[in-house]
Image: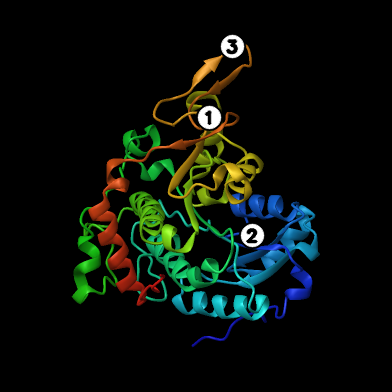
Amino acid sequence: KPQRRTLPPVLGGLKAGNKKLCVITGASSGLGLSAAREMCEKDDYFVICAVRDVDKMRSEAAAQGMDEKKYAIIECDLASFQSIKDFVFDLKAFKSSRPLDRLVCNAAVYLPKDPLPKYSEDGYEMSMAVNHLGHFLLCNLLIDDMAKSKDARCVIVGSITGNSNTVGGGLVYPRADVGQFQGWVQDNGEGKKIEMIDGKGFFGAKAYKDSKVCNMMTVSELHRRYHDKTGITFSSLYPGCIAETALFREKRQWFRRGFPLFMKYVTGGYVSEQEAGERLAQVIDDDLCKKSGVYWSWNGNAKQVGLYDPKTKTVSGAGGSGGEIFENDQSNQVTDIERAGRMFDLSSKLCGVEWPEFK
């Protein structure tokens, strides 16, 4: 077992006080950092930043002016099941017997330029390992703690790219398609060193989209299996297209320059990192978002390109900046109960976990 790079904080009860405890993965950049900053500005929350690079998180938090009394940093590499288990151990040492009030599964990787798949420490394709399986394991290990909270919420960030009933998911090639999880049942049911979840050849952009389908299926299944028994609110969201986020760091330079302009002035799907962070913070905290099993969106359903408003000189109605929050619908693939149940059971097997029984 490799040694951990950092020593975790312990006995955080005095530092956190009576505030609600909120874990955010991928808090060192993009949407996660923006949401962490937003939550730190609320008086009744203490944020646990679950990140792969502790030093980077420390530097970014300082640059953002985040109050050191409002957050702690604990190492968590979602590409390693052992690192995730170490994180949960460290988190429990930090919070002691206090319940966990919020779990925000945000971290993601997007590898569209890779011609061949990369694999996680545990042998799974990297996009699926980090975006889905790592968060799936984290939910499993923390659901007991969340069930002890009076108002727990588990939020998994979704994407229109995983919804084939949207412009971004249905018209932009390749489309998400998890098939019948043929890849996961290969290798004697271990699914290791398998390039794609559907058993086909590797396609980096599709691997990301497939992982987001699994994210949204996970929310639906957790809601169906555990909301009534635990009271936990399980929800997903599409915060809009953060076209300048580090998620696109693997794309070519011309794309990184042109994509924000395209999303802002043509499709109308653009949001800034700050606004996206505010939207995620709303789902984490707002009383409007207590309903479980919901896929939250803003400013239109992203099923068409936006419409230009000459009065405001903005493009609206495609999930971009502005607008009000609403309950969006998802594609038939995501809402397929039988397929979602199969995904849940196979993911449990790949992660090597069983789920607790709640009365």
Q: Amino acid at mark 3?
A: Pro
Q: Amino acid at mark 2?
A: Ser
Quarter holding the C terminus?
A: bottom left
Q: On the picture, is 228 further left or further right than 29?
A: left
Q: Is residue 77 above or below residue 333?
A: below
| View extreme (top): residue | 310
**Residue 183 at what x, y percent from top left?**
23, 63
Residue 178 visible (yes or no) = no
Residue at left offset 64%, top offset 43%: 278
Marks 1 and 3 sit apart, C-alpha to C-alpha, by 17 Å
Q: In this view of the protein, which residue sits in the foreground, 5 or 293?
A: 293
- The answer to whether mark 1 and mark 3 are in CB contact below 8 A is no
Q: Amino acid at mark 1?
A: Asn
Q: On the picture, is 115 further left or further right than 54?
A: left
Q: Secondary structure at mark 3?
A: loop
Q: In this view of the protein, which residue sits in the foreground, 37 or 13?
A: 13
Q: On the picture, is 226 further left or further right than 13?
A: left
Q: Is residue 126 above or below residue 168?
A: below
| Marking on residue 310 | 3
**Residue 45 at what x, y percent from top left?**
71, 58
Q: In this view of the protein, which residue sits in the foreground, 174 or 182?
A: 182
Q: On the picture, is 339 further left or further right than 322?
A: left
Label 1 crowd (10 A; few <14 / some 14-19 / many >=20): many
Marks 2 and 3 sit apart, C-alpha to C-alpha, by 38 Å
Residue at left offset 48%, top offset 27%: 267
Residue at left offset 45%, top offset 48%: 158
**Residue 214 at what x, y percent from top left?**
36, 55
Q: In this view of the protein, which residue sits in the foreground, 111 or 320?
A: 320
Corner quadrant of residue 120: bottom left
| Marking on residue 28 | 2
